[in-house]
């Protein structure tokens, strides 16, 4: 059974003596380390203040993150949103986290589960309490279909397939949006194109403002003009889709065609076969992406270069730059070859030099011309002092 926690600002929290931003609801028996970890995932930045007419447009954070507590991995599904004013008449937020272990994952995937009505709390009744058990995720699956939300916001449903292809290859991806745009339906449509067993391997956030150390997010949505948006220029090897400007059509691929038609059978024999072999962990996915060498990137006002598929997958179409890079990686000698080619000549040269220096040393010690040869041992031997008895004159009287 899943565990859960609610975090907000109240005059009296669940822990005796706590107030302000603190935990108000948690499952019985939840470890202190897990509680602390969930509280660190409750950050939120208001785009509009409570008195602003656009306060209702403040983005909602829907996220799926992987955390490790005491050596045990957990899937954390969260909703963090604006909650008006707290008891001190300052801005408030409400964070609800549901923790699932591996056995509690449903085929629909995390994006589908976050979109189920009533799965996450949107309000708090003001009564701190301990829950005897956590909520059970509803069973269900996400049926792939035409990416209609992508067609409405981006102008082309194929962009949903472009995002699915990038995440399937382990590539980081970012969506730039304006407040008021709904990001969760876009992510759900893209992840529905992936096999059910791989959907839980993708971490995402519909409104990223920061993460604690040790937590990664592969697919992030950032607000236009935010500090996170500015830092995208310093993020290489990432797909960036700017929804605030004209995009044009995405580069053609099997994923793009599947997103437009809703027919995932088009992915058979393409990158989907390679995706099925990829491990679901983020570290392994990143390693796989590095091995593939994907470098595609999209920018505002234009189309990104084609997304790279693994060269081993049937029908994979690689961009020319990626083909050249992959070719160089295949033909380049490995480090043992470098060691053999450079180490053996150096060893021979060192041996010859040592023999030559030794011969020079013997020549110098032997001397030149008619001078007697002096060995190194003789040269280093201290000079013997003359015997005191033999040094005395013959007629010197003997001492008593």
Image (cartoon, rainbow, N blue to C red):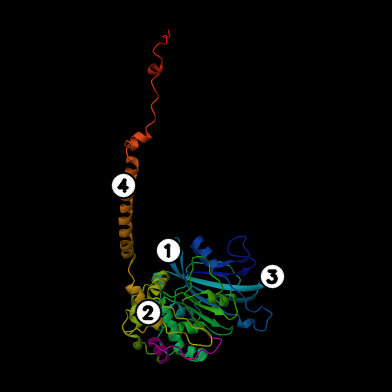
Dot 4 and dot 3 residues touching (CB under 8 Å): no
Q: Secondary structure at mark 3?
A: loop
Picture coordinates of residue 250, whole percent (x, y)? 45, 88
Could you tell me how far apart the alpha carbons at marks 1 and 4 are, in whole angstroms?
A: 66 Å
| Extreme-top residue of the structure | 400
- Crowd rating for badge 3 (residues with CA inside 10 Å; few <14, some 14–19, many 20+): few
Q: Nearer the viewer, residue 179 or 360?
A: 360
Return the disc, 2 or 3, that comes first in the chain's sequence. 3
Query: What type of secondary structure mainly makes up the magenta span?
Result: loop
Return the disc, 1 or 4, that comes first in the chain's sequence. 1
| Foreground tag (4 vs 3) | 4
| Foreground tag (1 vs 2) | 2
Extent of the magenta region: 243-260
Could you tell me how far apart the alpha carbons at marks 3 and 1 are, in whole angstroms?
A: 38 Å
Instruction: Answer with left or right where residue 18 lies relative to residue 320.
Output: right
Would residue 249 be counted in the magenta stretch? yes
393 over 161 or under it: above or below = above
Could you tell me how far apart the alpha carbons at marks 2 and 3 are, in whole angstroms?
A: 61 Å
| Foreground tag (3 vs 1) | 1
Task: Specify whether residue 379 is in view.
Answer: yes
Q: What residue did someone put label 2 on? A: 324
| Foreground tag (1 vs 4) | 4
Picture coordinates of residue 293, whole percent (x, y)? 40, 76
Q: What residue did someone put label 4 on? A: 359
Would residue 251 be counted in the magenta stretch? yes
Quarter of the image with the N terminus in it: bottom left
Q: What residue did someone put label 3 on? A: 88
Q: Secondary structure at mark 2?
A: helix
Return the disc, 4 or 3, that comes first in the chain's sequence. 3
Could you tell me how far apart the alpha carbons at marks 1 and 2 are, in whole angstroms?
A: 41 Å
Q: What's the residue at 60%, 60% (across, down)? A: 16
């Amino acid at each position: 059974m899943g565990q859960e926690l609610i975090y907000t600002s109240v005059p009296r929290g669940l822990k005796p003596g706590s107030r302000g931003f603190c935990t108000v609801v948690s499952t019985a028996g939840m470890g202190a380390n897990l509680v602390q970890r969930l509280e660190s995932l409750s950050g939120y930045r208001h785009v509009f203040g409570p008195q602003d007419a656009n306060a209702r447009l403040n983005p909602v954070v829907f996220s799926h993150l992987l955390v490790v507590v005491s050596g045990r991995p957990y899937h954390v599904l969260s909703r963090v949103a604006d909650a008006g004013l707290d008891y001190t008449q300052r801005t408030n937020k409400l964070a609800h986290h549901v923790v699932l272990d591996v056995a509690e994952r449903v085929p629909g995937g995390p994006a589908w589960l976050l979109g189920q009505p009533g799965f996450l709390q949107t309000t708090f009744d003001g009564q701190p309490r301990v829950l005897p058990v956590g909520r059970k995720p509803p069973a269900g699956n996400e049926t792939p279909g035409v990416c209609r939300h992508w067609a409405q916001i981006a102008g082309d449903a194929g962009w949903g397939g472009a995002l699915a292809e990038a995440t399937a290859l382990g590539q980081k991806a970012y969506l730039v949006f304006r407040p008021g745009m709904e990001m969760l339906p876009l992510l759900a449509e893209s992840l529905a194109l992936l096999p059910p067993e791989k959907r839980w391997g993708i971490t995402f956030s519909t409104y990223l403002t920061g993460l604690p150390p040790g937590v990664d997010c592969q697919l992030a949505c950032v607000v236009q003009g935010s500090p996170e948006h500015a830092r995208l220029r310093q993020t290489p090897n990432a797909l960036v889709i700017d929804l605030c400007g004209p995009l044009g059509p995405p580069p053609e691929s099997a994923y793009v065609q599947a997103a437009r038609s809703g027919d995932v059978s088009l992915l058979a024999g393409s990158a989907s076969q390679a995706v099925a072999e990829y491990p679901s962990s983020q570290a392994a996915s990143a390693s796989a992406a590095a091995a593939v060498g994907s470098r595609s990137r999209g920018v505002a006002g234009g189309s990104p270069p084609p997304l790279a598929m693994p060269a081993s997958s049937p029908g994979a179409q690689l961009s020319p730059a990626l083909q050249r890079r992959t070719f160089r990686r295949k033909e380049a000698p490995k480090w043992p070859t470098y060691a053999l080619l450079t180490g053996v000549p150096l060893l021979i040269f060192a041996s010859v030099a040592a023999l030559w220096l030794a011969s020079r040393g013997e020549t110098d010690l032997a001397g030149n011309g008619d001078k007697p040869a002096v060995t190194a041992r003789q040269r280093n031997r201290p000079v013997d002092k003359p015997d005191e008895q033999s040094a005395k004159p013959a007629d010197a009287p003997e001492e008593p």
